[in-house]
Amino acid sequence: MFTWLDRLQPFGALVLRLVLGVIMVAHGYTKIIPKGALYSFTQNVAHLGMPMWLGYVAAFTEFFGGMLLILGLLTRLAALGAAIDMGVAIVKVHLHGGLTGHGNAPGFEYPLALFAIALMVVFTGGGLLAIDQAIGRGKL
């Protein structure tokens, strides 16, 4: 009945890639650009019991990985980085708040949605208007 929608599948991948990229850049920006933000974020990561350097990895993965997603360059690799980033955020920050959160504890529904979007981009690629497609690396 809706088989005509199959032709629109590349647009779906494009939308998911762009939305994920914009969100990741926005979150990475808030961790990198404002004065003192990167140091503060890495301190928070250390307080969660993880090495401080993982804070740098997370912040730069979000910012630069998000840019790669928007461009559609190294799309699957950038999406995998986003999925790992969100997986760690769920386990280390949001899980104790439950799905929707309680009190001051944030829930994990939002990072879970980003995790799922990132996995979808890993599995399907970047869709239309991706640099990967233009240079013949659609499998990246």
Image (cartoon, grey):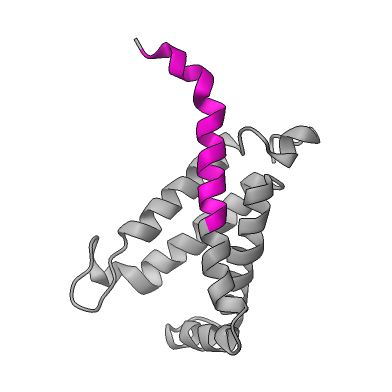
Residue farthest to the top, as pictured: 1
Quarter location, residue 101: bottom left
Q: Which residue is pictured at 44% across the width and 61% down the height?
A: 87
Quarter location, residue 65: bottom right
Describe residue 7's horizontal placement relative to residue 76 as left or right: left
The vertical placement of 19 against 123, above or below, is below
Quarter location, residue 121: top right
The kind of secondary structure the magenta stretch mainly shows is: helix
Question: Where is residue 6 drawn, in percent x and y?
Answer: 48, 18
Question: Where is residue 19 drawn, in percent x and y?
Answer: 51, 49
**Magenta stretch, residue numbers:** 2-22
Question: Where is residue 84 drawn, in percent x and y?
Answer: 52, 59
Report the quarter where the C terminus lies.
top right
The vertical placement of 110 against 119, above or below, is below
The vertical placement of 61 against 104, above or below, is above
- Magenta-colored stretch includes residue 19: yes
Number of disc labels: 0
Name the one closer to the observer, 70 or 54: 70
Q: Which residue is pictured at 63% across the width and 32% down the height?
A: 128
Name the one closer to the observer, 110 or 140: 110
Q: Which residue is pictured at 45% across the width and 13% down the height?
A: 4
Report the quarter where the N terminus lies.
top left
Question: Where is residue 27 drawn, in percent x and y?
Answer: 51, 68
- Magenta-colored stretch includes residue 86: no
Describe residue 34's horizontal placement relative to residue 135 as left or right: left
Name the one closer to the observer, 16 or 87: 16
